[in-house]
Image (cartoon, rainbow, N blue to C red):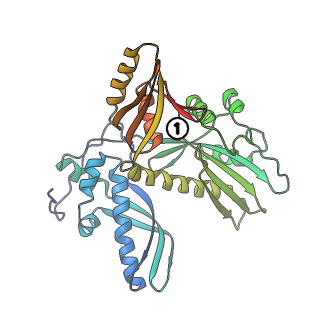
Amino acid sequence: MKFWSLLGLLMLLPAVAGADVSFEAGVNVATEAENASLAKEEAMKKANREAFLKVASRLTTKANVDKLNELTDDQLLHFIREVSVVAERSGSKTYQADLNIKINENLLKQYMQENEMLEVVSSPSKVLVVPVFSDTVYPDKVVWEDGNVWRQAWLDKGLIKSGAYDFIVIADNAVNRQLLSAEKAETISLETYNKLVSNNGIKDIFGVNAVRAGRNTLVVVIRAMPSGAEKRIMVTAEDGEPFDKAVAETVGYISSVMQGRTVEESSRQGSIDAVFYFNRLPEWLNMEKRLNNIPQIKRVRADAIGGRSVKINLEFSGSENRLRSSLENSGIYLQLENGYYILR
């Protein structure tokens, strides 16, 4: 892979049609070394590489990201346009920081074009947020009611964009009201999650439960659906209502989670057992062919074929959520029923 002279003038590349890609990334780093100075130096190298690869993954394939990871720390440094420190803490031998790093858009595009890497341009991904609000004085939780000032704070922002993500507040309609009450929004079943995805057209869903814990303080519990993985943050505004600040910090955290998933998921491997029911054997043979044509699925193994069913083991790359998405794009649905996965 060649690395051209960076002292020359850069060519401005034409914008790729339909692209709305962010060239910045949030990074959290923590390092330890012989002294604080060396720890910070190593942390910055690590942060630059992580941010660079996160941004690159929005423009090209996993294989090309792996090639870009072969660049040296000094070479990567040329792509860094700006580093902003959100928060930092250092000890005698440690350094920890939350950073926002901007990548030089023109330089990265030019390098990737010259090395025939500019292959995939991602449109913004949508994130669906479900704001639930309660007060320590009036503990009843609200989702759709007029008293949900937390939801109103999100709506007042309009369309929120953060990096490669658009944040959408769940719509107040009959189907969503039926699926989610304040109690149901705490933990949802896979069945409810699938119905929410079907009704809203968005797979990445986060519950954001805000509890007022004082005039200027909110405690926000951010919960990924349907896994239930959660993060608790406390937000205090010294000069008034903390809602705007809480929205910003919630968006920042979710964006960081989503950005980290982009790079990490592509290298993850997994397997899952499922059952497929059929009336005639050609139906199974057709399903097997369709499964083998999905790039994310690496191997399809029929463990047992009965009268009208077959037990299947699927080996796949990436996460289970990505597998579901790949299957659904091919008109195949993976559903959990009575503890077993069913292919339909």
* Depicted 126 relative to depicted 105: above or below: above
- Image quadrant in which the N terminus is located: bottom left
- Give the quarter of the image for residue 241: bottom right
Q: Amino acid at mark 1?
A: Lys
Indicate the position of residue 77 as horizontal and vertical percent values. Answer: 28, 67
**Residue at figure coordinates x 38%, y 85% from the top left:** 34
Camera-side residue of 255 and 161: 255
**Residue at figure coordinates x 39%, y 66% from the top left:** 47
**Residue carrying label 1:** 203
**SS at mark 1?**
loop
In the picture, measured across the screen, residue 142 lies left or right of residue 131, that is right
Indicate the position of residue 253 as horizontal and vertical percent values. Answer: 55, 56
Camera-side residue of 174 and 186: 186
**Residue at figure coordinates x 44%, y 51% from the top left:** 261
Indicate the position of residue 238 as horizontal and vertical percent values. Answer: 70, 68
Camera-side residue of 161 and 127: 127
Indicate the position of residue 45 as horizontal and vertical percent values. Answer: 34, 70
How packed mark 1 is, by other alpha carbons closer than 10 Å (few <14, some 14-19, many 20 or more), is: many
Camera-side residue of 305 and 157: 305
